[in-house]
Image (cartoon, rainbow, N blue to C red):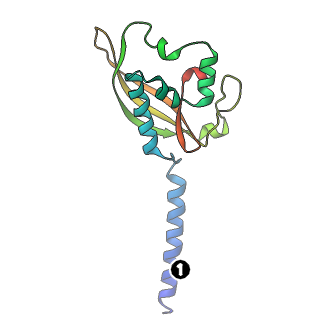
Amino acid sequence: MLKTAPLRVITVLALTVLSAFVTVFAGPRIPHKGELRSRVDLIYRAYQNKDRDTFESIIHSQAFRCVTSSRTDFFDSWNRAGHFEVASWKIRSIQAREDLREHPLEDCKGEPLRGDATALVFLAQTDRMKPVEGATTLFTQFWVHMDGTWYWVLPQAY
């Protein structure tokens, strides 16, 4: 029993060091990443189906307040240049944005956006302008996790 005691101590120390190493180098954590993916899909489906209520419910409340105060109907403005459709989209990657905790984005009133985590979603989006087929473009969307739910932040809001 005395011979195995040092082995146990070494094993525990090694596991502790390994755990600390993994924690430090794992990078920032994205809470509810599966839900974030679902919310991205939901906002695109809402846009395709012209479901304004669902679309607006996914926008961060501070960002939405800023866009609506500009008296621009952003939902309809996307279609002003002609009949525009989002044909498809695919999430390429998601990155946590821990740097925004130290330097938070501010809304149009100069208030920091509320939330407990932030992420950038990188997408490939294929648009179609009738009658011409469109091309695929890469987009980045900014999302904020607040009160257990992910919300999209429109670029016009910060």
Which quadrant of the structure image shows residue 157?
top right
Q: Mark 1 highlights which residue?
A: 9
Rendering quarter of residue 99: top right
Q: Quadrant of residue 92?
A: top left
Tell me, yes or no, if residue 158 can be seen here. Answer: no
Q: Residue at x 60, y 18 (%)?
A: 68
Mark 1 neighbour class, 10 Å CA radius: few under 14, some 14 to 19, many 20 or more: few
Percent x, y of residue 126 = 34, 22
Along the viewing direction, whichever of 65 and 129 lies nearer the viewer:
65
72 on left or right of 87 = right
- Residue situated in front as seen by the camera: 54 or 31: 54
Q: Amino acid at mark 1?
A: Val
Question: What is the x, y in percent for residue 25?
Answer: 51, 53
Query: Residue visible at 41% across and 38% down?
Result: 38
On screen, residue 134 versus residue 67, left or right, reads left
Q: Position of residue 110 (x, y in %)?
A: 71, 26
> Going by the image, does 10 lie left or right of 114?
left
Q: Residue, x 53% and y 34% (percent of image)? A: 151
137 sits to left or right of 111: left
Q: Is residue 9 above or below residue 129?
A: below
